[in-house]
Amino acid sequence: MPRLVYGVWDGTVYDNRNGGDATPPGLDLSVFDSFSEGNPARSFLSDRGFLVFDPGLPLLWALWKHFDKVASESCGKCSPCRTGAPLVRDVLAAARDGAAVDWQDLRDIAVQMSATSLCGVGQTGALPLLAALTHFPAELKPGESGDTCGFYSAITSPCIEACPGLVNIPRYIDYIKDGHDDLAANTVLRSYPLVGSCGRVCVRSCERACRRAKVDAPVSIRNLKRYAADRAIASGMLKPQDAAPAKSKRVAVVGAGPVGISCAYHLLERGYPVDIFEAKPKAGGMIRYGIPIYRLPKTTLQEETDIVAAMGARFFFNQKLGRDFDVDELFRRGYDAVFIGCGCPSGAYLGMEGEDTSLPGYENGIAFLERVYEGVEAGEPPVLEGDVVVVGGGNVAMDCCRAAARVATGETHLIYRRTEADAPADPEEIKAAKEEGVQFHFLCGQDALVVENGEITGLRVVDMERTEPDASGRRGVRPIPGSEHVIPCRHVIAAIGQKTDAAMLRDDEGIARDRKNCIVINAAHETSRKGVFAGGDCTSGPRASGPTTMIMGMGHAYFAARSIDQFLSTDQVPFDSRWRLSEWIARGGLLNDAAPAPAKPRQERVGVREITPEERDHNFDEVEQTMTREEAWSEASRCMRCYRVLSVITESPIPGNPA
């Protein structure tokens, strides 16, 4: 673990230059052990202050480098940051070279920046400098060079770090506020192509991190993304990024779901010819076949996959890995790299004693949602006669019960063995299901199918109770003896999980898998076979553990494409500084904000307009509606642009990031 020599963190001064080992409480300094392999941090600078781990660190040089990043990220909308940041950078550069400096004048500029800038770049970018000027001015020594150091700096925010795709959320919200909806959509396109689709079904981890919640409520980030995408699509302005000059090496992408589509998109941007092999007859994967049309119209999805086709991707449909081709065959066809993003296309059953999965009326949630999709697309939605019971508590279960409520002639019930608060589903999806008449039974577990004359007549369930917290504080559940009862029904849908296709890979293909048949990957998304990469639901590794969310999968695709690019360019998979910084932020809680609520007037969050529950009855019209221009502007104006500039100085140069 590195030793803190001196610094200022969260307003507290630490000085161990004469001995001692005082450290910021709650901060795990082992985070800073190494940035790239074997390359420890000499210093870390952020909105919370600065930490120095090497007594020989050229602090003045480090502050100049940090402020160079602050100046480059100034948007120019407010004069304190627009003029102050470059001025401070240049003064620090002059001081570094030995010029005389009026330190009080420099302090005044930095104070003015912090006090009057309109966003986090200016408000917090100067804080490490002010801390050094106040508490360690003698360490600002001219003439000291950091040319042998490594340096990496990035601008981020709590919402950006919460997004697996690292989308620059404040930037696209700014564009919306300024009336540039096309630029807003294209900002998201830098991270993934499925902008409108993600704007409808994203799980919104960014909103859970939004600091606006300290004032009133999080910014409606997902709906602003949807607004920008819908406006850009309607006007024909949703366009991909410019592609690099064409390269000779070819890549095969297996799976045309969000992960495969996104990986292909980023590779096409880099100039690689890409062929996409898909087991289904259309692109989209689970978001086409598994997310009902009332949540995601497939016209939106088609517009976005057409972008990838327009960039040059070739699609080969009805081609399934393990059935129509294998990985060896792809290399024999001349592909130089393979990316596998097959997802988890199979649903799981309940595993109850004596259950018969061939019974009419008993199906898993994935198969049911696919059947509903195909029926709606053909203009003949299926009809479920009688009552339906859905088992599960996640978003797939919500999709199943809301779809069932539209096609069943009787009532729809959902049972979940834990409490509503424990359910992993989006609370808004639970709310919508209740509005649509679904009857919820929490703390209720499945026991056995009730079958008469070869047909389901009910599901026997048992009431559950919560146990006392275990050592980790987690409470389990257990059946209540004698509470068994039957919920009459003719259909039971198991929506409790998904699994990979065990037949997609052979053991002799050299691609390691875990006990759940997920492909094992490293942080660069490499598999155990050279030239084969993977991501999304079908993988297990540092950032993957089986079935995940759409946005997490597209985040995998973004980093995997970068790794494939470098592999094909250099035959090596390089170190990724941006991912490592995010890992540091997550491990060390480096963006944790214990500050009081910002001094902002309360401004009500713009609600989502929806068609009424009555209008939803027995149809698949889209429920949520796109914001109007006025609504989008009002919501965008709530963003506080909580940008932070983070800089790390390392002992040696960082691969791919010269100081």
Image: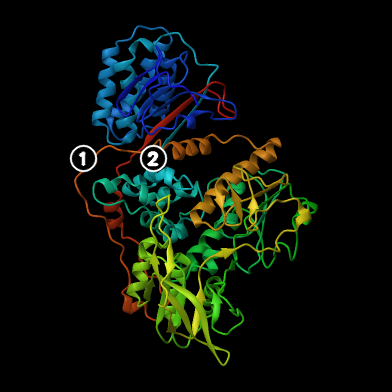
User: Residue 480 at x, y = what percent?
Assistant: 41, 72
Q: Which is more toward the observer, 151 or 307?
A: 151
Horizontal and vertical percent position of residue 250:
71, 48
Position of residue 305 relative to residue 520, above or below, is: below
Name the residue rendered at 41%, 80% in the picture: 412
Give the image location of residue 27, x and y in percent.
40, 32
Q: Quadrant of residue 174?
A: top left
Residue 240 image position (x, y, % from top left): 52, 50
Element class at badge 2: loop
Mark 2, other Cα within 10 Å: few <14 / some 14–19 / many ≥20 = many
Choose between 411 and 198: the one closer to the eye: 411
Q: Relative to the observer, which residue lies in front, 80 or 613?
A: 613
Q: Give the label on residue 599, or none.
A: 1
Residue at x-position 53% and y-position 47%? 241
Q: Which colour scheme is used?
A: rainbow
Q: Can residue 402 be seen in this view?
A: no
Looking at numbered disc 1 in the image, what kind of residue is underneath it?
Answer: Ala
Residue 54 visible (yes or no) = yes
Q: How far apart are marks 2 and 1 (CA)?
A: 18 Å
- Residue at 42% x, 53% y is 470
Q: Do the residues labelled 2 and 1 touch (CB within 8 Å)?
A: no
- Pointer 2 residue: 157
- Quadrant of the rendered image containing residue 407: bottom left
| Residue at the outermost right position | 332
Identify residue type, mark 2: Ser
